[in-house]
Image: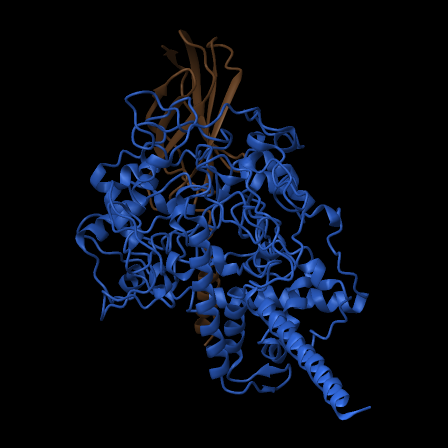
């Protein structure tokens, strides 16, 4: 009887979450790794997009891709952040970040990382890469 | 007095008496007409407000307004019939309950209120005027959807700033709530979330309370005008049987004068309660206004509006097998298209061709195809939006948008700041979130996005099609364009405004103008790598979310009142460029006005 009641209780709680429709947090991945990139998706003065792929980091459904960049590889003083939503059923996650207002004919150095919407890091940062705006 | 004089006097007296009788009868009829149709008024209506350059208002606007009003009155009369057909309402029990008839009664009352044109100063606008069943309870005028995007209010031609959102499933959105672990807001109603639902504990019931007093919609100057108009409604006693005797309000003699003057009129100044009532009567009027919202919301939640009868529901319930294109669309929706990261579809399993869903989520819950969240998709500013042109005072001294093209739609961000064109934010602890919310608009349910009248069975050219408008500013005119935008926004970006794509490029095909609000743009989408066929398959699965599907008779929609459209379908062209012939060049934009972008807490980056 107790087991039945507990089962019903769990079902009610579970259904409540489902009916709420807001994506719940999913288990955090033991280790997040960049599996592809980072790479330039678009390189224009008015809009540059950098993308990379990781295994699904889990955690909160809203994440930020973060690019730290600058013209000096030892001083990546600028930051660009773009929000994405995780898809709990996808094994991997693509992060894409917009950077606006870069200078033409200039080489930029950058690293990428990601974090949950509350600021908790996914624990992975890329090595320093570079790109040149034509 | 001789007999001739007596006859003469009697004749004069009878004539005067007859004259008085006829005159009073005429006045009575006139008053009745005024009450019933709003057409015959003692004074001619003020001249229409038309600050628009040629071409902003569609050429058929007047006839289309008349057409929708006829359809609204038809459904209103139908609802009156439904009310009269109800069994007697009997209140029993403790707490008192309308035993047996409560659900039907409140839903029918909600329908009556929703389709009642008297709830506006000129008795010419019901809620349904912007939300008709055959459009999934969204905008019913194809030419408006194609051009000015916001619908003309009771005082013509004031208009709002955004597209009319669908009613369907809107009561399922929870009260706006902060998820502290995510620092994000979920729930609420309206594109900008300004209907939080905090007081009625229903975002949708509160939603129904905004348009009646929105200066560019119904435009009543005082919420008590609803109670005042209900006092003379033919369904007054029905309202009171459900909600109690709260319509016995002692209104002052000038109430009609006030209620037939649109809100925002200079004569009212900043007074939002120009009807002077005793505290007791004001409390009653407020109670009536709450029940107005609650009744309409219950109608919207009923099977008459939100019945969960789409092909997708039938598939979930094992009553329908997807066609190959629908299945491919469903798989793309959850997979490559990544649509269900925001438009949650209830699938637990990522389907591959040949697989079937083995999860239990969808079969147990009715997925709503939204996460109740907010997102900035980076839509370009739509220069056809009627709001940009309402920069001069109208007949009543009201100016809807003194900022002109200096206005930017920051959506949820502006609401959190209690900013221009939104509503007061009832939770000051959320204000600090505004910079992260700038540009974000509500994630709509996908359900019924493709709903059209049966005689125009699609939203897509070449048709015959029913022209709809998509997203908050109606920039997108077909579902093909909508999917193509998600797919290629970042593949074909140009640093131009709408109407200025470079030669050789076609706007919405291989040129996307820059976003109106560049902050917080959602990068889940923008370069999905979908093929043309995959885009089309996503359109097909969205069409499968139209309610009214009957597995045993698939060719006839069961959706209530879907057959009430009396207008014309459109034909010709292609879905990819649908509406492009109505694009106009965006004028040189002034910087974002300080009344929008200069309000603390300031945007994370300046908004141009």
> Would residue B205 appear left or right of B466 to someone viewing this image?
right
Which color has been applied to chain B in this rendered view?
A: blue
Q: State which quadrant residue A21 falls in.
A: bottom left
For residue B29, which quarter of the picture?
Answer: bottom right
Task: Residue B42: tell me if it is visible.
Answer: yes
Residue sitting nearer the eye, B151 or B472: B151
Left or right, B174 with respect to A105, comes to: right
Question: Which one is nearer the viewer's eye here, B83 or A32?
Answer: B83
Which of these two is toward me, B351 or B317?
B317
What colour-coding does the image apply?
by chain
At horizontal 51% and vertical 11% (from top left) the residue drawn is A75
Q: Residue furthest bottom?
A: B3
* Residue B302 percent location from the top left of the image: 45, 69
Residue A115: image location, x then y, percent = 48, 33
Residue B536 drawn above or below residue B500: below
Image height of B493 relative to B372, above or below: above
What x and y, as percent, mark residue B174?
A: 53, 57
Q: Quadrant of the C terminus of chain A?
A: top left
Total numbered circles? 0
Residue at screen point 53% across, 61% down? B126
Report whether residue B331 is seen.
Answer: no
* Image quadrant containing the N terminus of chain A: bottom left
* Rendering quarter of residue B395: top right
Chain painted in brown in the figure: A
Q: From the viewer's perspective, is residue B302 above or below residue B6?
A: above
Residue B294 appears at what percent x and percent y?
Answer: 58, 66
Q: From the viewer's perspective, is residue A52 above or below residue B355?
A: above
């Amino acid at each position: 009887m107790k087991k039945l009641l507990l089962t019903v209780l769990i079902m009610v709680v579970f259904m409540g979450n489902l009916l709420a429709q807001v994506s719940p947090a999913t288990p955090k991945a033991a280790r997040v790794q960049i599996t592809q990139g980072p790479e330039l998706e678009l390189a224009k003065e008015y809009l540059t997009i950098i993308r990379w792929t990781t295994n699904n980091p889990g955690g909160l459904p809203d994440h930020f891709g973060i690019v730290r960049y600058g013209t000096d590889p030892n001083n990546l003083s600028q930051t660009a952040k773009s929000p994405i939503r995780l898809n709990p059923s996808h094994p991997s996650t693509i992060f894409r970040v917009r950077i606006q207002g870069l200078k033409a004919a200039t080489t930029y150095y950058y690293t990428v990382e990601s974090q949950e919407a509350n600021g908790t890091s996914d624990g992975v940062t890329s090595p320093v890469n570079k790109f040149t705006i034509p | 007095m001789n007999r001739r004089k007596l006859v003469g006097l009697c004749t004069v007296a009878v004539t005067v008496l007859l004259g008085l009788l006829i005159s009073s009868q005429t006045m009575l009829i006139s008053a009745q007409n005024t009450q019933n149709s709003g057409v015959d008024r003692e004074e001619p209506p003020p001249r229409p407000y038309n600050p628009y350059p040629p071409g902003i208002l569609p050429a058929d606007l007047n006839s289309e307004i008349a057409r929708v009003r006829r359809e609204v009155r038809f459904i209103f009369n139908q609802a009156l019939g439904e009310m009269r057909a109800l069994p007697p309402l009997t209140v029993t029990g403790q707490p008192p309950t309308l035993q047996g008839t409560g659900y039907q009664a409140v839903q029918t009352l909600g329908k009556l209120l929703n389709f009642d044109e008297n709830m506006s100063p000129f008795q010419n606008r019901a809620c349904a005027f912007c939300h008709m069943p055959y459009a999934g309870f969204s905008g019913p005028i194809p030419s408006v959807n194609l051009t000015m995007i916001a619908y003309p209010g009771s005082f013509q031609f004031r208009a709002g700033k955004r597209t009319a959102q669908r009613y369907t499933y809107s009561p399922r959105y929870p009260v706006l709530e902060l998820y502290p672990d995510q620092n994000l807001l979920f729930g609420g109603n309206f594109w900008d979330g300004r209907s939080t639902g905090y007081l009625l504990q229903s975002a949708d019931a509160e939603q129904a309370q905004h348009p009646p007093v929105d200066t560019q919609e119904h435009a009543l100057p005082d919420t008590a005008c609803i109670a005042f108009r209900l006092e003379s409604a033919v369904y007054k006693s029905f309202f009171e049987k459900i909600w109690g005797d709260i319509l016995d309000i002692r209104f002052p003699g000038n109430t009609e004068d006030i209620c037939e003057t649109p809100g925002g009129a200079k004569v009212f100044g900043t007074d939002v309660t120009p009807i002077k009532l005793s505290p007791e009567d004001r409390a009653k009027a407020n109670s009536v206004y709450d029940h107005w919202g609650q009744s309409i919301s219950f109608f919207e939640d009923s099977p008459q509006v939100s019945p969960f009868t789409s092909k997708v529901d039938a598939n979930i319930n094992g009553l329908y097998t997807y066609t190959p294109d629908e299945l491919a669309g469903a798989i793309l929706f959850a997979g490559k298209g990544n649509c269900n990261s925001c438009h949650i579809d209830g699938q637990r399993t990522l389907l591959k061709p040949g697989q079937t869903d083995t999860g239990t989520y969808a079969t147990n819950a009715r997925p709503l195809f939204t996460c109740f969240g907010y997102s900035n998709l980076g839509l370009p500013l739509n220069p056809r939006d009627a709001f940009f042109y309402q920069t001069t005072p109208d007949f009543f001294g009201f100016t809807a948008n003194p900022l002109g093209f200096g206005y930017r739609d920051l959506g949820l961000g502006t609401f959190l700041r209690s900013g221009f064109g939104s509503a007061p934010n009832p939770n000051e602890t959320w204000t600090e979130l505004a910079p992260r919310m700038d540009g974000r608009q509500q994630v709509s349910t996908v359900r019924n996005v493709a709903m059209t009248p049966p005689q125009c069975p699609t939203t897509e050219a070449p048709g015959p099609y029913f022209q709809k408008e998509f997203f908050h500013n109606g920039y997108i005119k077909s579902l093909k364009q909508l999917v193509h935008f998600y797919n290629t926004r970042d593949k074909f970006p140009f640093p131009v405004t709408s109407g200025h794509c470079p030669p050789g490029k076609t706007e919405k095909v291989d040129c996307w103008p820059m976003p109106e609000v560049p902050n917080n743009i959602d990068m889940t989408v923008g370069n999905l790598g979908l093929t043309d066929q995959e885009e089309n398959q996503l359109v097909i699965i969205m069409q499968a979310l139209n309610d009214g599907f009957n597995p045993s008779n698939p060719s006839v929609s069961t959706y209530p009142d879907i057959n009430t459209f009396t207008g014309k379908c459109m034909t010709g062209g292609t879905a990819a460029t649908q509406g492009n012939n109505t694009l106009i060049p965006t004028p040189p934009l002034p910087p974002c006005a300080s009344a929008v972008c200069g309000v603390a807490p300031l945007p994370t980056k300046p908004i141009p």
